[in-house]
Image (tube, rainbow, N blue to C red):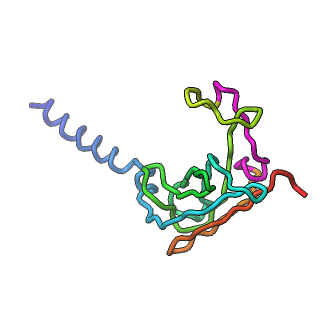
Amino acid sequence: MRLCHLVSPVLLLTIAFLSGCSTDTKQNSAKLVPVSGTVTLDGQPLAGASVRFNPDQKTKGLAAYGVTDQDGKFELKDRGDRKGAPVGHFRVVITKLAMPDGSPIPKDMDAITAGATEQLPANYSDPTKTELTADVPEGGKTFEFKLVSKKK
Protein backbone atom coordinates (compact mmCIF):
# COMPACT_ATOMS: atom_id res chain seq x y z
CA MET A 1 0.00 0.00 0.00
CA ARG A 2 2.84 2.38 0.77
CA LEU A 3 4.32 1.74 -2.67
CA CYS A 4 1.06 2.90 -4.33
CA HIS A 5 1.14 6.12 -2.33
CA LEU A 6 4.71 6.71 -3.43
CA VAL A 7 4.23 5.79 -7.11
CA SER A 8 1.25 8.09 -7.71
CA PRO A 9 2.97 11.32 -6.57
CA VAL A 10 6.16 10.38 -8.44
CA LEU A 11 4.18 9.63 -11.61
CA LEU A 12 2.25 12.89 -11.34
CA LEU A 13 5.42 14.89 -10.79
CA THR A 14 7.07 13.21 -13.79
CA ILE A 15 4.09 13.98 -16.05
CA ALA A 16 3.93 17.58 -14.82
CA PHE A 17 7.68 17.98 -15.33
CA LEU A 18 7.62 16.56 -18.86
CA SER A 19 4.63 18.60 -19.97
CA GLY A 20 6.13 21.84 -18.72
CA CYS A 21 9.68 21.34 -19.93
CA SER A 22 9.36 21.49 -23.65
CA THR A 23 10.18 25.07 -24.60
CA ASP A 24 10.74 23.74 -28.11
CA THR A 25 7.04 22.85 -28.35
CA LYS A 26 6.11 26.27 -27.01
CA GLN A 27 8.47 28.00 -29.44
CA ASN A 28 7.36 25.71 -32.26
CA SER A 29 3.71 26.65 -31.74
CA ALA A 30 4.34 30.23 -32.90
CA LYS A 31 1.93 31.40 -35.59
CA LEU A 32 3.43 31.05 -39.05
CA VAL A 33 2.80 33.27 -42.06
CA PRO A 34 3.57 32.43 -45.70
CA VAL A 35 7.13 33.24 -46.73
CA SER A 36 8.58 32.47 -50.13
CA GLY A 37 11.02 34.02 -52.53
CA THR A 38 13.68 33.76 -55.19
CA VAL A 39 17.45 33.56 -54.98
CA THR A 40 19.67 34.57 -57.89
CA LEU A 41 23.45 34.52 -58.20
CA ASP A 42 24.94 37.00 -60.65
CA GLY A 43 21.49 37.44 -62.20
CA GLN A 44 20.84 33.70 -62.72
CA PRO A 45 18.45 31.51 -60.65
CA LEU A 46 20.35 29.62 -57.94
CA ALA A 47 19.07 26.03 -57.77
CA GLY A 48 19.69 23.72 -54.83
CA ALA A 49 20.58 26.42 -52.31
CA SER A 50 19.49 26.19 -48.68
CA VAL A 51 17.75 29.27 -47.32
CA ARG A 52 17.48 29.68 -43.56
CA PHE A 53 15.75 32.49 -41.66
CA ASN A 54 17.29 32.69 -38.16
CA PRO A 55 15.14 34.75 -35.75
CA ASP A 56 16.73 37.53 -33.74
CA GLN A 57 16.34 37.63 -29.96
CA LYS A 58 13.05 39.57 -30.07
CA THR A 59 11.36 37.28 -32.62
CA LYS A 60 9.23 34.53 -31.12
CA GLY A 61 9.49 31.17 -32.78
CA LEU A 62 12.14 29.02 -34.37
CA ALA A 63 14.16 29.24 -37.56
CA ALA A 64 12.51 28.48 -40.88
CA TYR A 65 14.17 26.95 -43.90
CA GLY A 66 13.69 26.09 -47.54
CA VAL A 67 15.57 24.84 -50.60
CA THR A 68 15.55 26.57 -53.95
CA ASP A 69 14.21 24.79 -57.01
CA GLN A 70 15.55 25.03 -60.59
CA ASP A 71 14.09 28.54 -60.91
CA GLY A 72 15.70 29.70 -57.66
CA LYS A 73 12.32 29.74 -55.89
CA PHE A 74 11.84 28.64 -52.29
CA GLU A 75 9.08 28.34 -49.70
CA LEU A 76 9.91 28.33 -46.00
CA LYS A 77 8.89 25.67 -43.47
CA ASP A 78 9.62 25.12 -39.80
CA ARG A 79 11.23 22.04 -38.24
CA GLY A 80 7.80 20.47 -37.88
CA ASP A 81 7.35 20.78 -41.66
CA ARG A 82 4.65 23.44 -41.23
CA LYS A 83 4.66 25.98 -44.08
CA GLY A 84 5.73 29.53 -43.26
CA ALA A 85 7.83 31.46 -40.76
CA PRO A 86 7.05 33.44 -37.61
CA VAL A 87 6.50 37.19 -37.83
CA GLY A 88 9.64 39.14 -36.93
CA HIS A 89 13.19 40.07 -37.87
CA PHE A 90 15.61 37.47 -39.21
CA ARG A 91 19.22 37.05 -40.25
CA VAL A 92 19.16 35.11 -43.51
CA VAL A 93 21.77 32.48 -44.34
CA ILE A 94 21.97 31.07 -47.87
CA THR A 95 24.30 28.17 -48.56
CA LYS A 96 25.09 26.16 -51.67
CA LEU A 97 27.18 23.03 -51.26
CA ALA A 98 28.71 21.40 -54.32
CA MET A 99 31.74 19.41 -55.33
CA PRO A 100 34.97 21.43 -55.49
CA ASP A 101 34.62 21.63 -59.28
CA GLY A 102 31.10 23.07 -58.90
CA SER A 103 29.26 19.90 -59.92
CA PRO A 104 26.34 18.60 -57.85
CA ILE A 105 26.90 16.24 -54.93
CA PRO A 106 26.35 12.64 -56.08
CA LYS A 107 22.88 11.44 -55.02
CA ASP A 108 24.26 8.40 -53.20
CA MET A 109 26.66 10.47 -51.03
CA ASP A 110 26.27 13.00 -48.26
CA ALA A 111 28.04 16.36 -48.52
CA ILE A 112 30.81 15.59 -46.01
CA THR A 113 31.70 12.18 -47.47
CA ALA A 114 31.67 13.62 -50.98
CA GLY A 115 34.03 16.44 -49.98
CA ALA A 116 31.54 19.14 -50.94
CA THR A 117 32.46 22.76 -50.33
CA GLU A 118 30.51 25.98 -49.84
CA GLN A 119 30.06 27.80 -53.16
CA LEU A 120 28.82 31.14 -51.80
CA PRO A 121 30.77 33.92 -50.10
CA ALA A 122 30.72 34.06 -46.30
CA ASN A 123 28.67 37.28 -46.34
CA TYR A 124 25.72 35.06 -47.40
CA SER A 125 26.62 31.57 -46.13
CA ASP A 126 28.19 32.13 -42.70
CA PRO A 127 25.61 32.62 -39.91
CA THR A 128 28.00 34.97 -38.07
CA LYS A 129 28.92 37.05 -41.15
CA THR A 130 25.76 37.15 -43.25
CA GLU A 131 24.71 40.59 -44.44
CA LEU A 132 21.24 39.35 -45.38
CA THR A 133 18.25 40.22 -43.22
CA ALA A 134 14.50 39.95 -43.60
CA ASP A 135 11.50 41.44 -41.83
CA VAL A 136 8.50 39.11 -41.99
CA PRO A 137 5.21 41.04 -41.56
CA GLU A 138 1.86 39.75 -40.26
CA GLY A 139 0.57 38.85 -43.73
CA GLY A 140 3.75 37.08 -44.88
CA LYS A 141 5.96 38.17 -47.74
CA THR A 142 7.80 37.17 -50.89
CA PHE A 143 11.52 38.00 -50.82
CA GLU A 144 14.09 38.39 -53.56
CA PHE A 145 17.74 37.79 -52.73
CA LYS A 146 20.10 38.97 -55.48
CA LEU A 147 23.51 37.51 -54.64
CA VAL A 148 26.80 38.28 -56.36
CA SER A 149 29.67 35.82 -56.47
CA LYS A 150 32.30 38.45 -55.68
CA LYS A 151 32.19 41.73 -53.82
CA LYS A 152 32.73 44.72 -56.06
Residue 121 screen position, x and y as percent: 79, 48
Residue appearing at x 78%, y 56% in the figure: 42
Q: Nearer the viewer, residue 90 or 72?
A: 72
Query: Is 5 located above or below residue 75 in the figure?
Result: above
Residue appearing at x 50%, y 75% in the figure: 139
| Quarter occupied by residue 130 | bottom right
Total marks in image:
0
Q: Is residue 119 left or right of residue 56?
A: right
Residue 35 screen position, x and y as percent: 54, 64
Residue appearing at x 66%, y 26% in the figure: 114
Quadrant in which the N terminus appears: top left
Query: Is 46 located above or below residue 60 in the figure?
Result: above
Region in magenta: 112-128
Q: Nearer the viewer, residue 151 or 13?
A: 151
Q: Is residue 17 left or right of residue 80?
A: left
Which residue extends farthest left? 1
Q: Is residue 1 magenta?
A: no
Q: Is residue 83 left or right of residue 70?
A: left
| Quarter occupied by residue 74 | bottom right
Q: Nearer the viewer, residue 45 or 53?
A: 45
Residue 14 screen position, x and y as percent: 29, 40
Which residue extends farthest top? 113
Quadrant in which the C terminus appears: bottom right
